[in-house]
Image: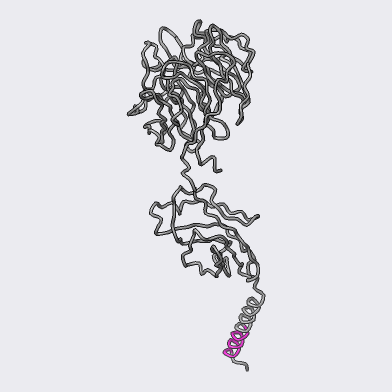
């Protein structure tokens, strides 16, 4: 008779043998990962008192074997060594990591020692299989010059075909158009937008000689302006041929295209029931929707306006106004921020800049912030806002206008797709017309 204990012991031995066999089989046939790629990288350093390194976003180009930061670190940034963290396809992603430092040092890195980041030029990773490797060229980009220097160059003067008493330049259909008053006529010259503008006269038709040049705006692919004599709205679809537009209400001001998800809506000031009201018009003025009353001291003529749409803040959508004259014929010395909200125009004024006169000032939007050219004792001040117009900062010496930049008011400022700032003419401090062209650009765009 066979003991039941013997049978139980035999079964246990057989199971142990089978389990051991499985373990040996698994160990002999294990496939180690062959992916040596780096999927994320981060840096940190106790010497980084500004705390910038953890926020650096690196691009990992797996095809060309490159790791770099597209957005350069600030001018003057420096740390000698950093802690480097590499992330692979798994928690045990790399069998070996080698780093190459300038000028000629290559060594196996243990993933815990600090690295002299200014000298790091290459990282080689080996997959867990111990065979497959991947090389990456490493570059930590740091601005080598102050990126916020604004460099100004005078690139033209006396470029108009006839003497000008007042003028307004706009960018339209990849061209500059300068409309100007010469005697009793409105004339225009135009050029393709380029580094070397070549101006030529535009043969205008249908444009009244009393057109208010300061009222020129662009909405979609149409130019609009107001006739100072009749209050009629005029439009052009090619910059040369103009015609009047029938409107339901008398238009007092064209403030510009509203920044919104529906393009082509224009913000107006109109007269209705002996009041001046905000109104929204579609792009052919066939539909004008009345809104709330305008404040009494908002400008309606000769103001500067810009549309502000932030690339980083969805809610930051405004029309800014500066300078100009109110319905009571008084000068406006405020900067207005207008925003549509639920069919109503909400408005506030900025904290008034500590220096500078806003009469004849010029607004423009550049580097994702509003800028303003104002005047002070016959010279121009450049100001900007870091908080979308709530406060204004006078630009430092690195952005000041050159000594031969004549102080001016009512100048036209246009920015282009290449991050250039174009300044056209204006009225000098001695009240004479200026017919010149200046171009500026921040260093950070010139280096890209």
* Image x and y of residue 290, in percent: 47, 15
- Look at the picture and state if 72 lies above or below 183: below
* Image x and y of residue 417, in percent: 58, 33
* Image x and y of residue 222, in percent: 59, 19
Asked whether 348 or 215 is in front, the reply is 215
> At 49% across and 58% down in the image, what residue appears?
118
Asked whether 147 or 366 is in front, the reply is 147
- Look at the picture and state if 226 lies above or below 356: above
Q: Quadrant of the C terminus?
A: top right
Asked whether 118 or 48 is in front, the reply is 118
The residue furthest front is: 404
Magenta-colored span: 4-14
* Image x and y of residue 241, in percent: 63, 13
Q: Is residue 368 left or right of residue 352?
A: right
Number of labelled discs?
A: 0
The colour scheme used to paint the residues is: one colour
- Look at the picture and state if 30 lies above or below 239: below
Asked whether 393 or 252 is in front, the reply is 393
- Within the magenta stretch, is there residue 416? no
């Amino acid at each position: 008779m066979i003991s039941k204990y013997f049978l139980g012991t035999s079964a246990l031995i057989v199971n142990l043998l089978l389990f051991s066999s499985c373990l040996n089989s698994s160990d002999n046939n294990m496939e180690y990962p062959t992916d040596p790629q780096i999927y994320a990288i981060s840096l940190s350093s106790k010497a980084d008192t500004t705390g910038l390194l953890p926020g650096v976003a690196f691009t990992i180009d797996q095809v060309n074997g490159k790791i770099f930061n597209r957005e350069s670190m600030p001018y003057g940034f420096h740390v000698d060594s950093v802690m480097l963290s590499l992330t692979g396809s798994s928690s045990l992603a790399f069998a070996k990591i080698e780093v190459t430092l300038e000028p000629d040092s290559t060594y196996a890195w243990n993933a815990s020692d600090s690295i002299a980041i200014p000298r790091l030029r290459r990282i080689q990773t080996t997959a867990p299989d111990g065979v497959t490797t991947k090389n990456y060229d490493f570059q930590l980009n740091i601005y080598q010059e102050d990126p916020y220097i604004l460099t100004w160059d005078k690139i033209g003067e006396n470029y108009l075909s006839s003497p000008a008493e007042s003028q307004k330049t706009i960018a339209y259909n990849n061209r500059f158009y300068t409309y100007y008053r010469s005697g009793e006529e409105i004339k225009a010259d135009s050029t393709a937008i380029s580094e070397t503008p070549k101006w030529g006269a535009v043969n205008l038709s249908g444009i009244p000689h009393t057109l208010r040049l300061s009222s020129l705006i662009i909405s979609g692919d149409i130019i609009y302006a107001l006739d100072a004599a009749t209050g009629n709205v005029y439009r052009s679809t090619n910059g040369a041929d103009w015609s009047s537009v029938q409107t339901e209400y008398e238009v007092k001001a064209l403030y510009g295209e509203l920044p919104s998800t529906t393009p082509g809506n224009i913000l107006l000031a109109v007269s209705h029931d002996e009041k001046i009201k905000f109104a929204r018009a579609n792009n052919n003025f066939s539909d004008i929707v009345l809104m709330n009353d305008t404040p009494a001291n908002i400008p309606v003529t000769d103001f500067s306006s810009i549309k502000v749409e932030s690339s980083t803040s969805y809610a930051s959508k405004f029309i800014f106004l500066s300078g100009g004259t109110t319905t009571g014929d008084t000068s406006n010395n405020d900067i207005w921020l207008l925003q549509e909200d639920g069919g109503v125009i909400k408005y506030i004024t900025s904290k008034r800049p500590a220096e500078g006169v806003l009469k004849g000032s010029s607004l423009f939007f550049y580097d994702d912030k509003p800028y303003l050219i104002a005047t002070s004792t016959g010279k121009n001040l450049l100001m900007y806002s870091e908080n979308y117009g709530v406060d204004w900062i006078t630009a430092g010496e690195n952005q000041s206008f050159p000594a031969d930049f004549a102080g001016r008011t009512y100048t036209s400022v246009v920015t282009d797709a290449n991050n250039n700032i174009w300044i056209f003419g204006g009225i000098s401090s001695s009240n004479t017309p200026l017919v010149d062209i200046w171009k500026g650009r921040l260093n950070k765009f010139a280096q890209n």
